[in-house]
Image: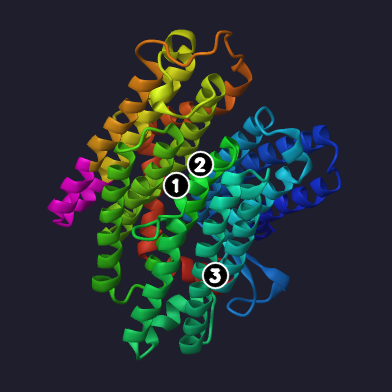
């Protein structure tokens, strides 16, 4: 019975989205149902995480068809770490939306599409079949298309065209990769692929297929040079949507890279992981250089997503137990902190009516809580101890030094320094100094603070309890670097 729990993180938001459709014009009921479902999702994710941590991998087999023939959902430590972090951010964003999303958007299915987005996110984390990964990707993307354009503002429509086109091209590559993989192995079940891919004689073809998938996942993750769609797309929609996107969407691509390149494509490490390592390093460098040249708070936060994703790819490319554990830790840290920074940026815009650094200043005097929230979250993003970002970057640097990648480690340290510079640029321009661009009457923002405060405290908690969380990510990395754990669990119907 416990194995059936693996499907619940997907079923809960799906059922909620369907029910919400019947209350299109009753915003109050939509908010109540969305909030309760979000809290239930957090509780469920922690409950299932505890089961996986204590009892082992849980496998749901759809229709009781045994793997590799049936559809499977697999809850292992990595997928549940991602589900827990994502459920927290989803709940925080839903509660923030109650006070920031206008009723017109709410009446046009805002909450149902947020839930459908989470169906795609959770499904991507839990699926054990690479074709169903494509399906869940598409569910996530279709929901994100609606959320990007909901409201019909000119900037939203302009950015949506670019976002949709690039993802359509990426999806076409995904289908090509799936078709090629099936043609040489005769299966799409990930555990079965892990067994059969090494047996294929044409390993050069397998490497080529792995690189096709890398193009797909690099696009989803906004790695260089396929990141150009992200900054504009994440600045166009309401801040609650931007916070949800910024925290989660690129991390789905990173999760899949971790899964696929530790489970399925492990034969030609010298080529595949070298490509990931170099691209990751270039991504963190180009991203931070883009951030330090901008003077719009939302734009800076958006382009920093690119830079931070580079660190995650850097850890995947190093391909050691420590580097994978560090990449996982850094990913969940970034899910929390990046969403937090977007919410704080939204609060700042609510106060000043602008996102331009040159048109505001001195908020610290009237809004000290907002200022210090940003200060803490900014330091966490830059990797200043004892906050969450420090321990992820420290572990990545150790893994890089162990691998002898001294130049690349030096670049990662350089990027951290400039990340700190760009965060302090925002703090000094927006919150410090003389008051500028301040409204005559103080803006009531008390209702907006609690969701962002939750994420600030989580970043502090992750730093204070880094040893415990790194313990989980190290255990997860050890399982990933020994794929037989996953293979045996799935192919023997979830019994480890």
N-terminal label among 1 and 3? 1
What is the C-alpha distance between the residues marked 1 and 2? 6 Å
Q: Which residue is mark 2?
A: 235
Q: CA distance from mark 1 to mark 3?
A: 39 Å
- Kindly indicate the quadrant of the structure image that contains residue 275: bottom left
Task: Find disc 1 in the rendering and name its residue.
Answer: 231
- Residue 272 image position (x, y, % from top left): 30, 70
Task: Select label 3 or label 2 by which is in front.
Answer: 2
Give the residue displayed 52% in from the left and 26% down from the top.
349
Residue at the far bottom in the pictured view: 201
Residue that sits furthest to the front in the current view? 154
- 427 vs 51: above or below: above
Kindly identify the residue that appears in the image at 20 percent across and 52 percent down.
Answer: 400
Mark 3 lies on residue: 490
Q: Is residue 17 above or below residue 317?
A: above
Q: Is residue 197 visible?
A: yes
Q: Secondary structure at mark 1?
A: helix
Q: Residues within 10 Å of mark 1 (few under 14, many from 20)?
A: many
């Amino acid at each position: 019975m416990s194995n059936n729990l693996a499907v619940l993180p997907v079923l809960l938001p799906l059922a909620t989205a369907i029910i919400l459709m019947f209350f299109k014009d009753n915003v109050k009921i939509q908010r109540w149902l969305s909030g309760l479902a979000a809290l239930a999702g957090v509780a469920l994710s922690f409950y299932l995480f505890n089961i996986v941590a204590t009892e082992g991998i849980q496998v749901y087999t759809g229709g009781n068809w045994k793997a590799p023939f049936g559809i499977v959902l697999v809850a292992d430590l990595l997928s549940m770490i991602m589900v827990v972090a994502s459920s927290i951010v989803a709940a925080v964003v839903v509660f923030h939306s109650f006070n920031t999303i206008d009723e017109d958007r709410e009446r046009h299915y805002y909450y149902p599409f947020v839930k459908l987005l989470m169906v795609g996110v959770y499904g991507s984390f839990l699926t054990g079949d690479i074709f169903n990964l494509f399906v869940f990707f598409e569910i996530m993307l279709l929901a994100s298309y609606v959320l990007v354009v909901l409201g019909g503002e000119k900037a939203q429509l302009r950015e949506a065209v670019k976002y949709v086109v690039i993802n359509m091209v990426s999806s076409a590559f995904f289908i090509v990769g799936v078709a090629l993989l099936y043609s040489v192995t005769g299966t799409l079940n990930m555990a079965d692929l892990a067994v059969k891919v090494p047996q294929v004689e044409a390993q050069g073809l397998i490497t080529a297929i792995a690189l096709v998938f890398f193009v797909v996942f690099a696009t989803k993750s906004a790695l260089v040079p396929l990141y150009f769609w992200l900054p504009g797309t994440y600045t166009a929609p309401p801040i609650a949507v931007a916070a949800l996107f910024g925290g989660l969407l690129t991390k789905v691509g990173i999760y899949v890279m971790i899964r696929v390149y530790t489970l399925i494509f492990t034969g030609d490490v010298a080529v595949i992981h070298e490509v990931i390592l170099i691209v990751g390093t270039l991504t963190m460098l180009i991203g931070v250089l883009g951030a330090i040249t901008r003077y719009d708070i939302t734009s800076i936060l958006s382009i920093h997503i690119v830079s931070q994703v580079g660190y995650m790819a850097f850890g995947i490319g190093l391909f050691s137990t420590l580097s994978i554990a560090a990449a996982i830790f850094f990913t969940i840290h970034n899910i929390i902190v990046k969403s937090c920074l977007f919410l704080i940026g939204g609060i700042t815009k609510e106060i000043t009516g602008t996102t331009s650094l040159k048109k505001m200043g001195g908020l610290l005097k009237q809004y000290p809580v907002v200022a210090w929230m940003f200060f803490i979250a900014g330091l966490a993003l830059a990797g200043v101890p004892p906050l969450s970002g420090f321990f992820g970057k420290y572990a990545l640097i150790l893994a890089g030094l162990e691998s002898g990648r001294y130049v690349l480690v030096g670049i990662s340290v350089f990027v951290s320094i400039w990340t700190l510079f760009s965060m302090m640029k925002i703090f000094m321009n927006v919150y410090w100094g003389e008051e500028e661009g301040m409204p005559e009457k103080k803006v009531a923002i008390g209702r907006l603070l609690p969701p962002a405060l939750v994420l600030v405290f989580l970043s502090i908690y992750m730093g204070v309890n880094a040893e415990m969380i790194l313990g989980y990510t190290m255990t997860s990395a050890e399982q990933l670097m020994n794929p037989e754990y996953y293979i045996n669990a799935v192919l023997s119907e979830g019994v480890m």
